[in-house]
Amino acid sequence: MDAHALEAALRPADGEKCVFDTNPVLNERLTHYCPGCLHGVAHRLVSEVLHEPDLAPRTILVAAVGCATFTYDYFNVDGLEAPHGRACAVATGVRRARPEAVVFTYQGDGDMAAIGLAESLHAANRGERITSIFINNTVYGMTGGQMAPTTLLGQKTTTTPEGRCLAREGGPVHLAEIMAGLEGVAFAARCALDSVAHVRAAKKALRRAFEVQIQNLGFGFLELLSSCPTNWHMDPVTAARHVAESMIPVFPLGVFKDKAAAPSGKPSDAANESEHTAGGAADA
Amino acid sequence: MPKYRDVIMAGFGGQGVMLMGNLLAQAGMESGLEVSFIPVYGAEMRGGTANCTVVLDEHPIGAPLVRTPLSTIILNEPSLRKFQPRLAPGGVQVVNVSLVEKGLLAADKHSVCIAANDMAHDLGNVKLANMVALGAWLKAVPILSLEAVQEALKRVVSTHYAHLIPVNAKALEVGYKAVAA
Amino acid sequence: MKDERILIKGNEAVAFGAADAGCRCYFGYPITPQNEIPEALARLLPERGGQFVQAESEVAAVNMLLGAGACGVPAMTSSSGCGLSLMQEGISYMAGSHVPGVLVNMQRGGPGLGDIGPSQGDYFQAVKGGGHGDHRNLVLAPSTAQECYDFMFRAFALAFKYANPVLILGDAIVGQIKEPVRRMPPSDAVPAEALIRSTASWRMEGYGRRGPDGRPRLLKSVYLAEGALAERNRLLAQKYASMRAECAWDCVQTEDADLVVVAFGSVARIARSAMRSLRRDGHRVGLFRPVTLYPFPAEALAALAPGRRFLVLEQNLGQMVEDVRQAVFGLDGPAKVLWHGIMPGLFASADDVREPMLQALGEVR
C-alpha cells in the first residue's frame, strides 16, 4: 500500500476519534529495530517534521552504516546509501548537485563521531546546507555492543569489559558542543528521547535543524540521546531511566547554537524547554 | 636542416629556467612545429638545479625527455656538472660564463660562452640573464627566428609583468647578436 | 601568427576537457603531480555555474562524487597513487550502486609515499577493480595532452552509458607535459544535457520532481535477502561483459613488424621514439598501444600474434604483462611475450627503452 492510500485508509470513520495518526512520510513496513529501541521515535519525529510543511517530495535521505543502515526502508523519500562514516560527504555531493533539495543524514555514534568524524566536522564547517541527525546511545548496536566514541566512563561494553577508562580509552565525545563551535553550523542542539517532554522538545529542535537548511543559514545538527536496551542488557523502561540518570548528566541537553535566534541574545525556546524538562525526566 | 631539436635548460631555482622553456615551446608551437615542454621538479628543485626539457619536431613528439640532449642551456655550475657529461656527441652547450668557470668546460664539447649575468646587468636587470642565454641558443641552434620568440613573449609573460616584455625582447636580441653566425 | 592550438599541461587539458564535456561538480584533495587539475577547475567550474569543493581528504572526495553521481550529474575527482588507494571503498560502492563518475589518477612512484616521479604501478589497482568485491572500472590511458582533453568527453559518456566509475589512468609525465592542444570537442562528444537526461529513471532528486505519481526510490549496494546479492552480481557480470564493446587501441607499423612493443600511456610515446630510430636502422618494430586498459583489447592483440613476438614495456615491476600473456595464451605458434620494466620514479628517455628493444629483436632472430 503506498503512502497516500495508507493515509486515506486510516482516516477515522463517522463517530470515531483519531488519537494517533500515521503520516505518509513513514511507511507501514515493520522495522528491524529491537523491541524498546528509540530509533522508531526518532524516525517518527523526522517524518512529522518532513510532513508538516510538505518537504518529503523534495527530500533526499543519506543513510549511514550501523543500526540506521535501513533507515531508507522506512521513509517515503528518495534514499541513498553511504559507506560507513561518509554520510556527510555523500550528502555534500548530493547538496552540491541538487541545490533545491532538502538533504539529511541519519547517523549513529560510531558512524558520525568515530569513523566519520572528519567528514562530519568538515561538512559542518563548510556550512553545507544539510541536516544531520546524530543518534547517541553510547554503544555500537549493529555489531553487538562494542565501545562507541560516546561510551560513558566506566560503562562496560564487549570491548571495554572492565568499563571505559579515561586513561586508556579517553572520554565520551561531546559532539553537539564541538559542532556549535564551528563557523558553518547554524544550529546545534542536544535533546533526549527518554520522556514525552523531551520528545516534544526534540521535535522542536529537529524542526529548527531543518529550517536552518531551508533558510540557507548553514549546517543543522541535532544530537538525540537514545537507548539500546539490547546491548545495555536492560528492559526498555530501565533503559529510558538510564538515559535520564546516567547520560543526561554527562551530555547536557540544550541548544548550543541557533543562528536564527533572537538578537537579544536569549537562548531559543527549544533550549529553555530542554533545560526545564531535564529535571522532570530525571524525576520520572 | 632536419626539423628536430631538443634542449635541456638548467640553473638555480629563480633564474627563470621554466620561463625560458615555456617561451621556447610557445614560440615553436606558434611557428607551426610540434613541441613538448616538461619540467623536472621535486627534491632537486630545492637548493640544487631546476631544469626542463623542450623538444621541437616536425613530427608528433614521442619521448619528451632525453638522456643525451642535442643542446643545453647551462646557467650555473651545478648544472654544468650534471649535464655536460650527458651532452650528445656533436651537441652544443650554451654556458653562462658569468657564473661558470671557463676552466670547467670540457675540451671535447662544443661550448658557446655567454656572460649572461654581466650582459643582463648592463641592460639594467640581472634577472634578464635567462633571456640573454636563450637569445644565444637561438643563434647557436638555428630552428626558430628571434622574432618568433620575441613575439611569443606576449603569450608567456603574465599580464602583471607585461611592461617588462620590451626589455625581455631586447635581452633576447642582445644574446642573439653576441654569438657569431 | 597566432596558432589555434594552446600550449597547456596534460593536467590542465584534463580540466579543460572536463569543463567542456559538461562536468558540473569537482571534488578533490591536493596531491602532486596533479594539482593543476583542481587549480584549473576551481576557476572553470564556478564560471559555468558548477561546483568546486576542496574536500578534507580523498575519502571525503570520492564520497562526494558518489553523492553527486547518484543525483545523475556529471561529476569527477582526481588524485594520484596514495589518494586513489583511499578512494577504493567509495569506488566499490559506486560500482555496486550503479553510480556514474569520472576519476583521474596521475600516477606517482610508489609503494607508500614513494616519490612524485612517473610510474605505472597502479595498473593492477585500476584494471582489476582496486577495492573490495567484484567491481570493475572502465579505464582509459591517455598518452598526450590532447588525449587528456579528448578522453574526458569519452570518460563522461562511458560513465553515464554504463552507470559505472570510469578511471583516467595517466602519470606524472602525462600530467606535467606541456603540449599544443586543440580545445575542440571531439566529433562524437555527447552533450552534457543528454548525459543528464539518460539518468531520469534512477537518479536522486526528490520524488516530487517526478510528477504527481512520483514514488520514492533507493540507490544502494547492500542486498541481504537470500539470493539477492548473487542476482546483483550476475547483473554486474553482464554489465562488465558488455563493456568489451568499448575496447580501443592504437597500432603503429605493426603490419610488417617482427617485434611488437606493447606499451600504454607515457611509456608508449617513449617507445615510439626508440622505435623510430630502430626503424631507421632497418629493424622491423611495431607498437601496440592499449587505449582502454579495462576492457583490455585482448582480441586485437591476439590477432597480431601469428609470426610475431611481443615486448611489453611498462613502468612498474610487471603488471600489464599478465594481461598480454593471457591474451595470447594457448595460441598456435610461438607468441612469445618478453617483458622489460622501467623502474617507477625514473624519467625515462628513448635511450632507456632502445636497448631492451634491441635485445628482444635479437631473440626474434
Image (cartoon, coloured by chain):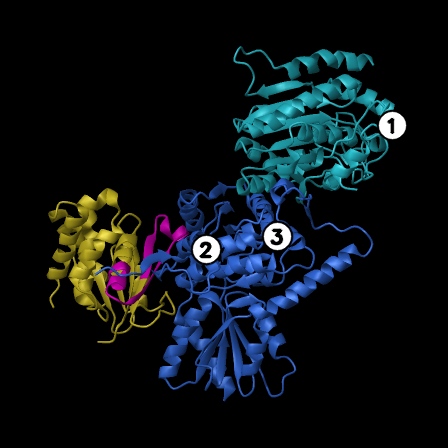
Q: Quadrant of residue A162?
A: top right
**Which is nearer the eye, A109 or C70?**
C70
User: Is disc 3 placed on a helix, strand or loop?
Assistant: loop
Label annotation for residue C99: 3
| Residue corresponding to mark 1 | A234
Amino acid residing under circle 2 = Ala
In the rendered image, residues at marks 2 and 3 fall on the same chain: yes
Q: Which chain is blue?
A: C
Amino acid residing under circle 1 = Met
Which residue is most to the right? A235
Q: Are marks 1 and 2 in contact (CB under 8 Å)?
A: no
Q: Which chain is yellow?
A: B
x%, y% of residue A160? 78, 33
x%, y% of residue A97? 54, 43
Q: Quadrant of residue A98?
A: top right
Nearer to us: label 3 or label 1: 3
Q: Earlier in the sequence, mark 2 or mark 3?
A: 2
Q: Is residue C194 left or right of residue A79?
A: left
What are the residue bounds of the magenta stretch? B25-53
Q: Which chain is cyan?
A: A
Residue A174 showing in the rendered view? no
Distance of label 1 from label 2 (alpha carbons): 58 Å
Reply above or below: A88 against C58: above
**Which is nearer the eye, C321 or C128?**
C128
